[in-house]
Image: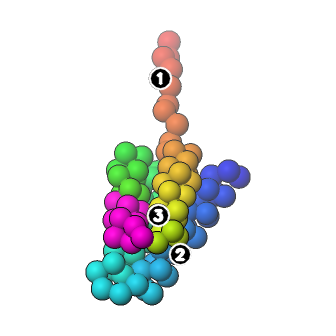
């Protein structure tokens, strides 16, 4: 199932963000840990509101990548998280129900 694969990859990227945050020093570390939690929360929110979930995904991925811009790994993980996470959120959002009229 494509949705499960995309969600699983995004969960792993969020966990990696948390691991990198735990290894980082100072405020950047807190951004990594909170970013990983926000990435997971975005996936949980995806079924209710894809716009809010996408905003939370960006909020989780971007601050740590910006704080550690000099690193090659964290900006790359942020890009992967945004790309794969967006696809996971879009695949989780409920299909628009079509209205059928009854006679």
Nearer the observer: mark 2 or 1; the answer is: 2
Q: In this view, does 96 lie above or below 22?
A: above
Question: Can you give x and y, in whole percent of width and height, for residue 29 in the image?
Answer: 36, 81
Q: How many marks?
A: 3
Viewer-closest of 32 and 55: 32
Q: Which residue is drawn at 39% across and 72% down?
A: 68
Q: Residue tagged by mark 1?
A: 99
Residue 95 in view in this figure? yes
Which mark sits nearer the N-terminus, 3 or 2? 2
* Secondary structure under the numbered disc 1 in the rendered image: loop
* Secondary structure under the numbered disc 3 in the rendered image: helix
Task: Report the span colored magenta.
Answer: 59-70
Question: Can you give x and y, in whole percent of width and height, for residue 47 in the image?
Answer: 46, 51
Nearer the observer: mark 3 or 2; the answer is: 3
Q: Residue tagged by mark 2?
A: 16
* Secondary structure under the numbered disc 2 in the rendered image: helix
Q: How crowded is mark 3: few (under 14 residues within 10 Å), some or many (20 or more)?
A: many
Q: Is residue 63 magenta?
A: yes
Q: Which residue is drawn at 40% across and 50% down?
A: 54
Cβ atoms under marks 3 and 1 closer than 8 Å: no
The Cα atoms of the two marked residues, 3 and 2, are separated by 12 Å
Q: Residue tagged by mark 3?
A: 75
Cβ atoms under marks 2 and 1 closer than 8 Å: no
- Main secondary structure of the magenta stretch: helix
Q: Residue 38 carries which label?
A: none
Nearer the observer: mark 3 or 1; the answer is: 3
């Amino acid at each position: 199932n494509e949705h499960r694969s995309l969600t699983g990859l995004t969960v792993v990227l969020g966990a990696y963000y948390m691991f990198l945050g735990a290894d980082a020093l100072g405020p950047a570390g807190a951004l990594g840990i909170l970013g990983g939690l926000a990435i997971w929360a975005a996936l949980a929110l995806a079924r209710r509101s894809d716009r809010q979930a996408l905003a939370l995904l960006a909020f989780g991925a971007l601050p740590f990548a910006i704080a550690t811009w000099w690193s090659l790994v964290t900006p790359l993980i942020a890009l992967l998280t945004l790309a794969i996470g967006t696809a996971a959120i879009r695949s989780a959002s409920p299909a628009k129900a079509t209205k059928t009229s009854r006679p």
